[in-house]
Image (spheres, rainbow, N blue to C red):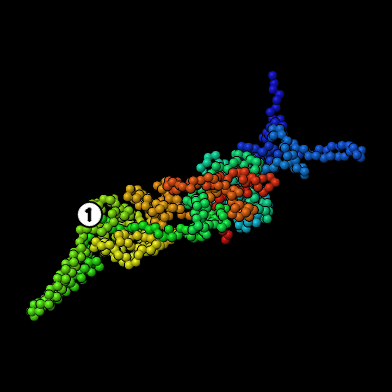
Amino acid sequence: MTDTTNRYDHDRSPYERPNLPFRCGREAAFGKPCPKGPSGNGTCQGISDCTPFQTRKLVLDEDTGEEREILRWECRRPAWAGGPCPEGPKPDGTCSCTHPPCAPRPTLRRQRGRWALLAVAAVFTLAIALMGFGGAPTLPSSTNPGELSGKHAQFTAAEGCVACHESHSTSLVGWVGAVFSKNTISDSCVSCHSFGKEPAVENEPSKNTLLFAAHNWNFANNSNALSTDCQGCHTEHRGELASITPLVDGQCAGCHTEKFDNFSKGHPEFSNTFPNQNPRTIKFSHSNHLEEYFADSRYKELAPKENCVSCHTKQENGRLLPGSFDTGCAGCHEQAIREQGFAVIGLPELSDPTLTADAAETCGFSQAEIEPAKTLISAVADSISSLNSVSEAFEENDSSELQAAVTAAADTAEALTETKAELEEAFDREEAVSLEYLPAVLSYLLKHPSDDLDAYSEDVASLLIELAQNGYEPLSELLEATGGSPNNLLAGLSDELVQRVVCAWTANQEYEALRDPEPGKGWQASPYQISYMPTGHSDSVVRNWIEFSLSEEVRESDLGNQVTEKMLHPADGPGRCFKCHVAPVSDPSLTTVTWKIPSQDLRPFTEFNHTPHLNVLNVGSGCATCHQGVETSKTTSGEEKNSPSHPKEFGPIKKSVCSNCHKEGGVQQTCVTCHQYHTEPTIRKRQN
């Protein structure tokens, strides 16, 4: 039996006949041809799904009894393309289903025709040359496609067409080469335009493939990302005043696999973490501050007067970020920062207090030793005077004077005994004055556990003697040996302070400061240690010590980790930095702290501008329209405090919140309203 079914009938298949000179550009690039295919002259016929047909119908008017003509446009989209569209033709007779045009490409048949024509032209030209005819007119380099936009015309005027179309030239060889070259100008585009990544490699287009991957480089590792070129979205030669940047939703849908008509009806739901994908850099509890701290009468005057926007005053890249520490936090936290310092040099208990006796050659006698010695000398002089008085009274045989002189001599002897005991105590090194431990910084620098008295005593004593002799230079050498920068870590420390304090310690005396330690005054000394008191928020010395403690060399040892833990402790660390800042304790590979809230969002292709939204909503209270609070616990564990994840204070924003306004008949809902394709676009080529 013969099958009479013709699967290539006009209403069953978009079959493109092989005798046509062009093939569909979409079919060549993506394997999905336009329904109609290109026309004979190479123009795209896929701009619309059909060519509406106008029908004419005569109807009898019941009122007048006259015939009246009714004209209607009917959709002629074939069945294989989906049949008549629901919208139908527009009133002017144009199709309502339109698409951006593609760039049809010549078929092999047409290229063979070109080759044959070129061969004939070459033979004809050669024949004229051989016959001695000269003065042949110069052929045009290309057919003029229309004026360039003003911006591009200004940069390409000197070079002309070859500024972009490198495969074309005015010579015969250039024309022949154009037949075999890929007809794209994207490589020329990136010679001037840059998108935040590596520039194009000259004369090596194959290395530039990723420059045109979907969304530039960000999805370069996605093997499913379609390759794109500049002409897919930007069409030139439309006139001097034309803009080539506006896009339509259809151009975006051409690559995205999930198709939908508009945002309100088809856009996928937002993720469960939107918009909180950014890692947290500041630990801040809104509920604790608003419901507890600012409710306290002591801090009531510091409470934000305009709700959210009292603190969130800085807008960058569409994000509404908190303002500076000085304007938002200093009123409560500045003093606490200044009060929490950290010890760098300390006097620990030594196995033998006499180990530091050699420092006496440099330091001399301490004040605690000099005063008893002076008193003893004075007591000796008094005793000699008393003995002379006794001798004189005895010779004069004056009993009353003799009794008084003996009494004075006895008092002098008692004072001499007491002074002798004080002097012996001042020089006694058997019973030491000290801390009960070796400070964590010295423990790491000297490579001895802080509680191993026998192991660290000799090295600590040697260091104290060197500090007494040379100031803080020996400490600088220890820091340099472990990868630290003394200029940064010891900035502001004076040799005089170090020598004065260490000399008191080597004499087995507590250091008596000239003034009591004050918060926020930098390097200071107490009886048993030299400490640094932060001068305020963002103190550079504190920051340098924290970054030093996070270095790989410090964190690779147990003693170094003790320094790191001390520096990162929320309550006892210097300046209490990590009561608010997130410490990188969960990832040992992190060697820096993100001190500031990043202004760049992790969603580089999503744009949001708070300003117009706040203008529509009530400033401050209107934030709750999108940012809905959720139940939270006011107490947070230590592990959660150092977690970079967001606290569950605000729930995710749902798509329905946006589609309340962005919908049909409401605020615009095009793709480019919220999304951008290029990131960090810049111009690399400048006009001469």
Give the residue pinned by disc 1.
351
Drawn side of residue 276 relative to residue 444, left or right:
right
Task: For the N terminus, give its image quadrant.
Answer: top right
Amino acid type for the residue under numbered disc 1: Ser
Q: Residue furthest top?
A: 1
Q: Position of residue 235 (x, y in %)?
A: 64, 49
Closest to the observer: 407 or 2?
407
Task: For the C terminus, give its image quadrant.
Answer: bottom right
Closest to the observer: 41 or 230?
230
Drawn side of residue 562 relative to residue 419, left or right:
right
Drawn side of residue 270 relative to residue 363, left or right:
right
Q: Position of residue 314 (x, y in %)?
A: 55, 57
- Badge 1: few (under 14), some or many (20 or more) residues near its Cα, within 10 Å? some
Q: Quadrant of residue 500?
A: bottom left
Q: Position of residue 165 (x, y in %)?
A: 60, 50
- In the rendered image, the vertical position of residue 410 relative to residue 348, given as above or below: below
Residue at figure coordinates x 61%, y 45% from the top left: 657
